[in-house]
Amino acid sequence: MQQQTAVRAEIVVDVICAHSYIGWTRFARAAARLREEGVDVQVDVLPFELAPGAPTTGSPLLEVLRHAFGEHAVTNALALADRAVDEGLSFDYGRAVATGTFEAHRLILLAGRQGHAEQMTERLFRAHFTDGLHIGDPQVLARLAAEVGVRIDDEAAAGSAEELKQRLEYVRGHGVRGVPVFVVDGVPPMTGEQPEDALYGALRSAAGRA
């Protein structure tokens, strides 16, 4: 296979999904390895809502989990936090805020238009899981956008809500029912928390370097 200088990957995530954050972190490391080899890894971040239409009032996450799913859901979340340490991540569920993520995904869309989708996605994950920030709050989102250098004025945001709805429908239409999902050029879709080496192998295969 001829070696490629660029590889395209679609990653479907929700920024309040712990499995997405772990998978995203592993993919980022895999992509960095291939970029060091001179391959341009182009990433399109696609949206998925774990809880479509969920309120953005900002209730404590552990209380919401306990009320909705029982104590075992809290236990599972805390176990994920322990496992995240192995990935170099810090999950502070004691401060985490439950929220709908439509507006957070819209911010990622705007960031993608401006070439900052990966940076914005990473910042939103960290804001939710580590910093205890309410990523459904417009003021918080505006502050995070400014940190990354993403414009959110009316001109920059034109048509973004409708485009986001189309992207959500695109994801649903392809049968995605859970995240993360990784779709790399010419490689079968990969779901769940894939090992870093598996993601790196998929990227190398797409680049003709396997």
Image (cartoon, rainbow, N blue to C red):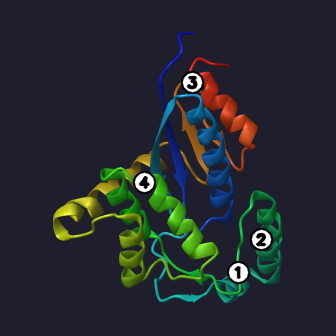
Q: Amino acid at mark 1?
A: Tyr
The residue positioned farthest toward the top in the image shown: 1
Q: Give the residue number, with chain letter if any, for mark 3.
A: 206
Classify mark 3: residues with Cα within 10 Å, few (<14), some (14-19) or many (20+). Answer: many
Q: Residue 178: x, y in percent?
A: 62, 54
Classify mark 2: residues with Cα within 10 Å, few (<14), some (14-19) or many (20+). Answer: some
In the image, is 2 to the left or to the right of 72? left
Label 3 residue SS: helix
Pointer 4 or 1: first along the chain: 1
Label 1 residue SS: loop
Q: Amino acid at mark 2?
A: Ala
Label 2 residue SS: helix
How many angstroms separate mark 3 from mark 2 (CA)? 32 Å
**Which residue is drawn at the image coordinates 54% and 70% (left, top)?**
51
How many angstroms separate mark 2 from mark 4 (CA)? 25 Å
How many angstroms separate mark 1 from mark 2 (CA)? 8 Å
In the image, is 157 to the left or to the right of 1? left
Classify mark 1: residues with Cα within 10 Å, few (<14), some (14-19) or many (20+). Answer: some
Pointer 3 or 1: first along the chain: 1
Q: Amino acid at mark 4?
A: Ala
Q: Give the residue number, with chain letter if any, for mark 1.
A: 93
In the image, is 166 to the left or to the right of 187? left
Q: Give the residue number, with chain letter if any, for mark 4.
A: 117
Pointer 1 or 2: first along the chain: 2
How many angstroms separate mark 4 from mark 1 (CA)? 25 Å
Residue 113 in the image: above or below residue 210:
below
How many angstroms separate mark 3 from mark 1 (CA)? 37 Å
Q: Give the residue number, with chain letter if any, for mark 2.
A: 81
Quadrant housing the N terminus: top right
> In the picture, residue 63 is in which quadrant?
bottom right
